[in-house]
Amino acid sequence: MNIFIYIAVMALTTYLIRLLPMTIFRTQITNRFVRSFLYYVPYACLAAMTFPAMVHDTDHLLSAILGSIAACVLAYFKKSLIVVAASTCAVVLVTELAYTLI
């Protein structure tokens, strides 16, 4: 029974998070600072969710660091998301395999 209450509360929370900005901000946001702040929010949230997972989901910190460097270098050269993700996974895999051989 409690699981249904949890699901209902999470559904309401998710709905309110999406509904409130639509009802509060009906007009175009003209403030330059607020617009620039809102522009970078998705990138900051993605980084905040991704970085801890990169560090904690590998067996060795070096493989996480090398994977992060590979991702940053490929993203800097404007490679596609698939290329960046696949290359980063390959770098982490090779580094982890190298650790098992040593």
Image: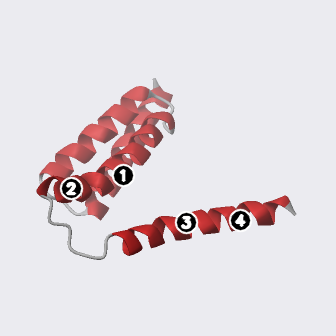
Q: At which x and y percent is residue 76?
A: 14, 49
Q: How many marks?
A: 4
Q: Residue at x 30, y 53 (%)?
A: 41
Q: Residue at x 25, y 38 (%)?
A: 69
Tell me the kind of residue under disc 1: Leu
Q: Secondary structure at mark 3?
A: helix
Q: Residue at x 21, y 55 (%)?
A: 34
Tell me the kind of residue under disc 2: Val
Q: What label does residue 76 carry, if any? A: none
4 or 1: tag closer to the N-terminus: 4
In the image, residue 56 above or below residue 39: above
The residue tagged 2 is 34
Crowding near the residue tagged with mark 4, few <14, some 14–19, many ≥20 C-alpha atoms within 10 Å? few
Mark 2 and mark 4: Cα distance apart in space: 33 Å
The residue tagged 3 is 14
Query: For this rendering, which residue is in front, 39 or 50?
Result: 39
The residue tagged 4 is 7
3 or 2: tag closer to the N-terminus: 3
Crowding near the residue tagged with mark 2, few <14, some 14–19, many ≥20 C-alpha atoms within 10 Å? few
The residue tagged 1 is 46
